[in-house]
Amino acid sequence: MRDKDLYAQILGIKSPWQVSEVDLNVAKGEVMVRVEREEGMNSCCPRCKKESPGYDSRTRRWRHLDTCQYKTILVADVPRVKCKDHGVVTVSVPWAEPNSGFTAMFEALVIDWLKEASTLGVSRLMGLSWNAIDGIMQRAVDRGLQRREAMNMTQIGVDETAFRKRHDYVTIVSDQAAGTILYVGDDRKKQGLKDWYSSLNEEQRGAIESISMDMWPAFIHATLESIPGAEDKIAFDKFHVAKYLGEAVDKVRRQEHKALMSEGYDDLKGSKYDWLYNPENMTRKHKMRFKLLRESTLKTARAWAIKEMAMSLWHYVSKTWARKGWKQWLSWAVRSRLKPIRDVAKIIKEHLWGILNAIILKVSNGPAEGLNSRIKTIKVRSRGFRNKKRFANAIYFHLGGLDLYPEGVR
Ligand SMILES: [Zn+2]
């Protein structure tokens, strides 16, 4: 087989294209494969597919899969046609997508590697610039999002995750059943989430049965304004409620510790984490000490008991009984004379409707938290995100459940 035929076979080059020249440059470590269009063939406008008169042509290059250790470059003069509806446009070639400097097969290989290795690793391995990899990822995600079919999600989670700095957040919407990320928003404001809801069709919005979230007003209002019957579907996440209560217990401990120390008592010294974490993980001796603390008359012990009580109120199956349980808890918390606890109780009282929904619907952000830890891994693997768009792309790429490969290469 002659080298031209060999390359035509390997590259899948078919009429009207043919391989006209193969040139091995040993010094440069490069194989150049020149591809030509058969003469006298008419070309079509890539947008309307109508046959159109030729206009001129432009020489273009694409990097293809290496031939042994040689970098392999495809070169072709690609015709431009003058379509009467779309003006002067470049015809499409079967081996690459428009505006890419890589063949589809090369992009597919990079996509496979990116799933396994860090951006830096892929950059070194394949001799590609960060920008080149970014372009491949971006095209893969755009393709995937375009192909994503309208499906009905029933249980979704809305969460936030920090981008780079603290206090700079993005919104993350996940499909809890599929474990995929549906949407990455620029910030955690109301409008972004509203825009995402309005990108769904009416049937999709109606199919959503639960929306698990933190008690963040922007998320609550965006959902109430977009999803029919949202007041029965918004579910405030148990772990976020636990976090607020945990912080309140810690505040009580700090205040009490300070007061005790000023009177010369160090009962609470070194106990910070005892109150925050599960005593099951403690050593026996440690457990005994914590038991004594817990059963003491300290304010911190009271705050802790109130928190534990709240955490035991998530097992109800009837809304009526759940409400009764929480009302009792609220009255205890309010009478506790512990300001940090009363402050959280106030928030819980205002949001009780959504806590009751979470209990009855049996949903939480647990699945979203799992995705959150995978997002952290992505962040580590792609150090140096220069902007949020890249960050969002990486999340869609790895966690979007998308079909990323170029047409014809799957
Ligand atoms: Zn056209």
Image (cartoon, rainbow, N blue to C red):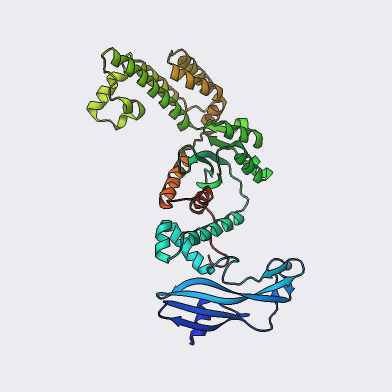
* View extreme (bottom): residue: 2
Q: Quadrant of residue 270?
A: top left
Q: Quadrant of residue 402?
A: bottom right
Quadrant assignment for ligand 1: bottom right
Q: Is residue 408 visible?
A: yes
Measuring from the top left, give residue 74's x and y in whole percent.
Answer: 53, 75
From the viewer's perspective, is residue 66 above or below residue 132?
below
Q: Quadrant of residue 311?
A: top left
Residue 280 relative to residue 179: left or right: left
From the viewer's perspective, is residue 238 above or below residue 108?
above
Q: Residue at x 65, y 37 (%)?
A: 226
Measuring from the top left, give residue 403's x and y in whole percent.
Answer: 54, 58
Q: Residue at x 55, y 38 (%)?
A: 188
From the viewer's perspective, is residue 196 above or below residue 295?
below
Residue 273 relative to residue 340: left or right: left
Residue 272 relative to residue 380: left or right: left
Number of marks drawn: 0
Measuring from the top left, give residue 292's x and y in whole percent.
Answer: 27, 19
Q: Residue at x 60, y 36 (%)?
A: 190
From the viewer's perspective, is residue 9 above or below residue 91?
below
* View extreme (right): residue: 84
Q: Is residue 403 visible?
A: no
Measuring from the top left, give residue 400's x and y in whole percent.
Answer: 52, 51
